[in-house]
Image (cartoon, rainbow, N blue to C red):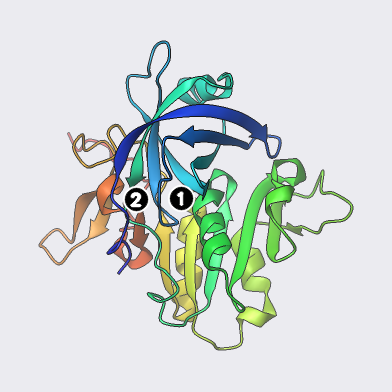
Amino acid sequence: MAGTTAPAARSCPARFITNVEMSSGLIRLDCELDAPLPFRPGQFAMLNLADGLPLVFSRPFSILAGDGTTLSFLYRVVGRGTAALARLKPGQGLTVLGPLGRPFPTPDELEGRPAVLIGGGVGLPPVHAWFARHGRDGDTAFFGGRDGADVPWSMLDARWGVSVDRAVDVPADREAFAGVVTELVASRGDLADGRTRAVLACGPIPLLRAAARLAAARGWDCWVSLEEHMGCGYGVCKGCVVPVATAGPDGWRNATCCDEGPVFRADQIRWDRYGVPVLPTT
């Protein structure tokens, strides 16, 4: 269902505009392209440095927003590539390849079902983009952070439910549920009215597992956007495979996350194999 009308990808030069700290760990990166880059929520782009020494491999980032020729991403500094992005100066060059991958389903593709959007940490961009573009009466959105300082409050208006692992540094004028975000979703009485909904989720693997379980327990469909390391972004290097169920004799196969995903139906994923270290048998 998802991704059947996704915009075509292109490679384009860009100029870095700014990094904005949205929380203690999350940074919004804005860049200026030569022309608008249409995308669907859930799609991503590969970013690299254009000035100085480029990174050997571009880095994948889910697209947070597009406004004219300005494209925005959200990231956390976790290694050499993201550290280089954090050091960029206004006007420095970037290369952007995108939009790539299969997006979340649109409201029409959900066939009238309200969406339950769940984002955790740096997995916020695709669900935030979906809610900003498609949010309707009856859709609900949730974000889970480590603590109050980790939550990008300015991005989350009063429609968002927020959870924190540690109930510290929560602003006095905001509320946060103490616990994991799927527990917050499960606690909401208005979502237990028997109405069929659809879950769209992005975040770390434990969050996605829990979202898939919650949806299955309620008979809801669920789509998950997977966060994988990628080398190329278009299915050539096979560096981002994930296990998906098949009807074959083994019952599963490796799917490239970048071009068969990053959005998958949750019931496609072999959760017993996904994120589980595979040790040699001899």
> On the rendered image, what quadrant is the C terminus found in?
top left
Q: Which mark is residue 205?
A: 1
Q: Is residue 189 above or below residue 213?
A: below
Residue 68: where, in percent of width, then height? 51, 47
Give residue 20's quadrant in the image: top right
Residue at position x 42%, y 11% from top? 52
Left or right of 53 on screen, residue 231: left
Q: Which mark is residue 274?
A: 2
Q: In the displayed orientation, state which residue is furthest to the bottom.
A: 194
Residue 275: where, in percent of width, then height? 38, 46
Residue 85: where, in percent of width, then height? 52, 24
Question: Badges 1 and 2: C-beta atoms under 8 Å apart?
Answer: yes
Amino acid type, label 2: Tyr
| Mark closest to the chain's N terminus, 1 or 2 | 1
Q: In the displayed orientation, state which residue is furthest to the top.
A: 52
Left or right of 264 on screen, residue 62: right
User: Distance between the Cα atoms at labels 1 and 2?
Assistant: 8 Å
Left or right of 99 on screen, residue 151: right
Residue at position x 61%, y 83% from top? 192
Tell me the crowding category of disc 2: few under 14, some 14 to 19, or many 20 or more residues within 10 angstroms, Cα based: some
